Image (tube, helix red, strand yellow):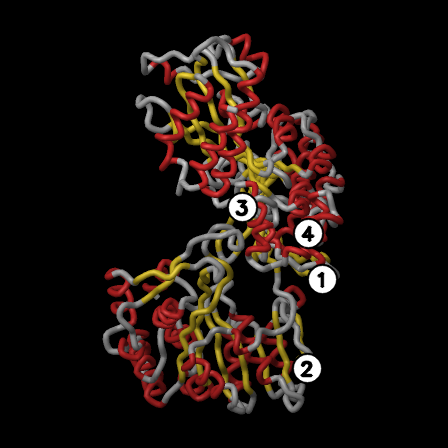
Amino acid sequence: MEQQSALQDLKNLLVNAPSLLSVYDTLEPMLLKLFKAQRMSIFQRRMQHQDLVARFKTGNEVQEIKVPISPHSIAGYVALSQIPLIINDPYSSDELSAIHPRLKFADKFDKHSTFRTQNLICIPILNAGVLMGIMQIINKNDGAFQSADLALANKVAQTLGNKFRYELGGTSQPFDYLVHRKVIDEPTLNKFVQANPEHELLVQRLMTEKRIPEDEMGIALSVHYQVPYIGYKPDRFRLYQSNSKLNLSYLKRNFVAVVTDSTDRPTVLMAQPSNASLLMEIESALGIESYGISVALPNTILQYLGEANGGGVGPGAMDEILDEIGTSGQEADEQLDDMSDDAPAVVRLVSRILHDAKRLEASDIHIDAEKNAPTRVRMRIDGVCRDITQVPASHHNAVIARIKIMSNLNIAEKRLPQDGKLAFKLSGQVIEVRVATIPTVAGEGVVMRILSTGGALPMGKMNLSPANQQTILRMIKKPHGILLVVGPTGSGKTTTLHAVLGHINTPDKKIWTAEDPVEITQPGLQQVQVSPRIGFTFASALRAFLRADPDIILIGEMRDKETAHAGIEASLTGHLVFSTLHTNSAPETITRLLDLGIDPVNFTDACIGILAQRLVRTLCQNCKEATLATDTDMDFIKRQYGADYLPELKLVSPLMLHKPKGCEICGNTGYKGRTGVHELLSMTPALRSLVYKTAPVSQLKTQAMHDGMRTLIQDSILKVIKGDTDIAQIQMLASV
């Protein structure tokens, strides 16, 4: 009766308390009296962390204790295994090692005080099967702790678990968060739960039949299990390579994957992180000191393991292939150079690299040889190179040879650079890749450019400023003349030109294009692939087009004086000509063409406009944060936009800008995708007179700005104020 009364008093105390900490001074003597013990500690799980913190304890020697959930301490082991323990002598290494070979007692707290721990009960605090914390009752007054004390501790821990669940903001069932968010109603959820007792199948059916997004489901599980959620991010996470006893079939059967990121700290992904016995098996097999635990969706775990939803479709999972390569690499060094490029693992590895690059929306793949080190595979995503994986050095030559065979290159020639092209299929779509091999001191390196596929981008999605949009639409209505799009390699020139062609591509227009290579195809265009190796150059293609009754001509690039002359002449003879040039700005393009020997009078008569552009990374629309512009930001904007033009920005005070934050969607970079910034020069009478006089670039720029041109940096500032990007991304343009 006395115990029941004490337990009821405990429940009443916690129900009315705003937090456990607020009533701990009352709770502590109640529990010590109940257990007839000297001291106690209550560890609470930190939200979304793999450790415990003791803020509730007897004694003032230590203000706060943090303990990792691992077998290296008594509290950590009980948290990991969720098995209650009675320890008769914590200083007995034999007693502790019989429980777990790595179990130790943290006696540093005893050493810093006059108190000595003699015996203890350590019990997990659970709620709905999820660990909430740990309770330790220390030093029984009248001998050793008994099984009756353990039963009593279980009842106390149950009451504490309800309180901790409330304080941690958790849910009592895995999918309660979805009901709270009104993603699904409770009766419907209950029907699914009753019909699908297996957790993994239930998750899959809810997502497919109720169309619940992966992130919503992941957050729901994260809130319930109180561990972080990790989605499928192959560019950020890879399978952890270790000498563990975990085989692939065991991991798939139990929906477990061990992954790591750039920090090389392993994380155990589980569909049900509350499965303590499974976690203990994993921990024992891994044999590592430190790791994290996260929840993942069942299909995501299978993707990491090389199956489900494309993870194992086609060429196979990257890490499985590398495992296979690692096994085959245990050969004598003299045999490595003779390794066949047709070895199944090498073939699948190259295919996997290509498929991953397309899925990650990479523009380039870099396979870089390293001396006495594994080969690095990097991909350029949104303009930034990222490390993706490594290939054993023993297989570098085989990988390069495989790529050469796919590209119809000479595999025997390793001393000279070679260029070629390959194609592969992804979901029935043919993807073309431009390949360049370059010999280095460490071995041959390869760079592969993934060519764009699909139709033209609509003009409305080019993100032109309103003024530039109106001007360029006016320019392309002209019956003849030449419009140049300029910028460095990879700045989106071809995309822009095809967007323009798509806008004017009507049945009454005959349009010819000469490109190298043809990346974007459009119905209604006559598109030609030039081939300089057989003498079919841009200049010869242009001469052929003039005999084919064109209205509009696109010349992929003005690489030389001959092509530039032919393009100008074509525009003067009644054709609308589009082309590209590798120059830094619109005014510089004029001087570059004049330096090629173009007649200034002919050029100014032909030219209707020059559009310079760059690509800048855009902020992730899912996680970007609004922030107040600092004085430094305002000074940058005012200085770079120019005092004479500043009023047209109509800046408000205070000015809100945006900054990157990072989330699962953007790979925690804060940026997702790229957008164009533009500089559009119109050929006005005043500018023509300066070109006749071969005026310097500075004068041409001043006049063009007076005529309405806004520079790349000015246009990028517009994009910053609009919220597309941030100042950090446009500072590199400030010197243009």
**Circle 4 — which element?**
helix
- Mark 3 neighbour density, 10 Å: few (under 14) some (14–19) many (20 or more): many
| Separation of marks 1 and 3 at Cα, in angstroms | 42 Å
First in sequence, mark 2 or 4: give its number.
Answer: 4
Asked if residue 672 is positioned above or below residue 258 in the image, the reply reads: below
Residue denoted by label 1: 430
Disc 4 residue type?
Asn
Residue labelled with disc 4: 190
Which residue does the numbered mark 2 point to in the structure image? 524
Tell me the amino acid under the disc marked 3.
Val
Q: Secondary structure at mark 3?
A: helix
Q: Is residue 273 visible?
A: yes
N-term-proximal mark, 3 vs 2: 3
Q: What is the spatial separation of the Cα atoms under label 2 and label 1, in whole angstroms? A: 21 Å
Residue 223: numbered disc: 3
Amino acid type of disc 2?
Answer: Gly
Q: CA distance from mark 3 to mark 4?
A: 19 Å
